Amino acid sequence: MKRRIINIDEEKCNGCGLCVTACHEGALQIIDGKARLVSESYCDGLGDCLPECPMGAITLEERETTPYDEEAVKRRLAKNTTNTEESVDCPSEGLQSQLAQWPCQLKLVPVNAPYFNNARLLIAADCSAFAYPNIHQRFMRNRITLIGCPKLDAVDYSEKLTEILKQNEIKKITVLKMEVPCCNGLVHAVKKALSNSKKIIPWDIITISANGRIVNE
């Protein structure tokens, strides 16, 4: 059948993985450093991944392909959820840390560190790493990770974040927080820093539940 489906320009793709996170059908995966369509039947053709791609590597085209298989998508997502639950007890051999810099505590990082230039920031609540087992591959990959707890750290994160945004060219900010009220402090700090820096930087919020589920993204 002829329908709309995404097309990925591998020359433009930098393997950042933002499209993988944006795809609610699980149709995309990073393979050999590039975004790949796992199966054409998993792609619904709505293009939720398009605005997330910083390289403009993804486009929509109309062509002959297999029909969108909603039931297959449901089975795949259910299987992925089961695998994520089981992976908590699995050995970590073969898994690689995606932490790109040290230190990673928000209150410790220097505001003019060279790794901030042209970086995508992940500003994560401390607890998110323990609640979501696949945080390295799903969220930290190709990002500079800053962690903190607005309830325990006696600092105003917005001041340091403002200086980081002012002194560096930041491409995007992702806030990874838990589904608890105190984590909203991270969101408020980012909003205040964006306002104070007077820069327009795309940003989003991803919320994790206490049992490790992604509540919204």
Image (cartoon, helix red, strand yellow):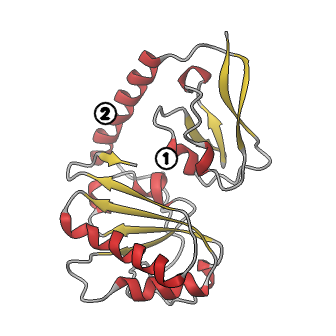
- The residue sitting at the right extreme is 11
Which residue is at 53% across, 59% downward?
141
Badge 1: residue crowd in 10 Å (few <14, some 14–19, many ≥20): some
- Mark 1 secondary-structure assignment: helix
- Mark 2 secondary-structure assignment: helix
| Gap between marks 1 and 2 measured at Cα | 18 Å
Badge 2: residue crowd in 10 Å (few <14, some 14–19, many ≥20): few
Q: Earlier in the sequence, mark 1 or mark 2?
A: 1
Would you say residue 38 is visible in this rendering? yes
User: Given this view, does label 1 or label 2 mark the residue nearer the observer?
Assistant: 1
Point out residue 66 in the picture as x, y percentages from the top left corner. Answer: 63, 14
Which residue is at 30% across, 46% downward?
215
Q: What numbered label is drawn on residue 21? A: 1
Q: What numbered label is drawn on residue 49? A: none
Point out residue 213 in the picture as x, y percentages from the top left corner. Answer: 28, 45
Would you say residue 108 is visible in this rendering? no
**In the rendered image of this protein, does residue 198 appear above or below residue 48?**
below
| Amino acid type at mark 1 | Thr
Which residue is at 57% across, 19% downward?
41
| Amino acid type at mark 2 | Thr
Q: Is the N terminus in the top left, top right, bottom left or bottom right quadrant?
A: top right
80 left or right of 165?
left
Point out residue 52 in the picture as x, y percentages from the top left corner. Answer: 58, 50
Where residue 156 sits, quadrant-wise, is: bottom left
- The residue sitting at the top extreme is 1
**Nearest the camera: 84 or 117?**
117
Where residue 68 sits, quadrant-wise, is: top right
**In the rendered image of this protein, does residue 59 appear above or below residue 110?**
above
Point out residue 178 in the picture as x, y percentages from the top left corner. Answer: 26, 60
Q: How many marks?
A: 2
Q: Which residue is mark 2?
A: 82
142 left or right of 89?
right
